Image (cartoon, rainbow, N blue to C red):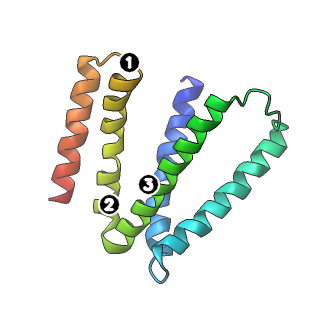
Amino acid sequence: MHSWQAYALGSAFFAALTAILGKLGVAAVNSNLATFVRTVVILLLTAAVVTWQRKWDSSGLTTRTVVYLVLSGLATGLSWLCYYRALQLGKASQVAPVDKLSVALSVLLAVVFLHEQLTWKSALGCLLILAGSLIMVL
């Protein structure tokens, strides 16, 4: 197994926990406040990891890099705000599959903006994700 695969599996596992724990966490509080608390925890966790790894060297941060990271952060924040509100209003077993449509959307955006190759396997996988999400929410 390649290291990226291990990290990707970890991401999937923790994303699954996010849905369950998030649903429990927004039961009695405003979803935006819940997102704020989650974000503070993420900030502290990430700062601890960077400190532990001694990786505070910012010499690679160019203006372009910072712009993309800020835009990515805005997209993440908006995603989380929407996700937690959806969890508050709906079932985790329905919200999570719709949220995972981001996989198919990411492939499409990678083809359009990053000029990545769309293989038949990727296209089929995206169609199956779409079909699976639709089946789970209808």
Residue behind mark 3 = 79
**Who is closer to the viewer here, 9 or 42?**
42
Give the residue at mark 2. Answer: 95
Q: Is residue 85 above or below residue 68?
A: below
Residue 88 percent across, percent down from the top left: 38, 73
State which tag comes first along the sequence, 3 or 2: 3
Tell me the SS state at disc 1: loop
Closer to the camera, 67 or 128? 67
**In front: 114, or 3?**
114
Q: Distance between the residues labelled 3 and 2?
A: 12 Å
Kindly identify the amino acid type of the residue bearing the numbered disc 3: Ser
* Vertical order, 15 against 63 (above or below): below
Looking at the image, which residue is at 35% across and 56% down? 96
Secondary structure at badge 2 equals helix
Residue at figure coordinates x 21%, y 45% from the top left: 132
**Residue 52 on image: x %, y %:** 83, 44
Tell me if 56 is positioned left or right of 29 in this view: right
Which residue appears at 42% of the width and 22% of the height?
A: 114
Packing grade of label 1 (10 A; few <14, some 14-19, many >=20) is: few
Q: Is residue 95 above or below residue 71?
A: below
Residue 10: image quadrant is top right
- Pointer 1 or 3: first along the chain: 3
Residue matched to label 1: 116
Task: Sort mark 2 into few (<14), some (14-19) or many (20+) by Cα contacts within 10 Å.
Answer: many
Query: In the image, residue 28 lies at what x, y percent?
Result: 47, 84
Between the C-alphas of marks 1 and 2, the distance is 28 Å
Q: Please report whichever mark, 1 or 2, sits nearer to the chain's N-terminal start.
A: 2
In the picture, the quarter occupied by the C terminus is bottom left
Quarter assignment of residue 101: top left
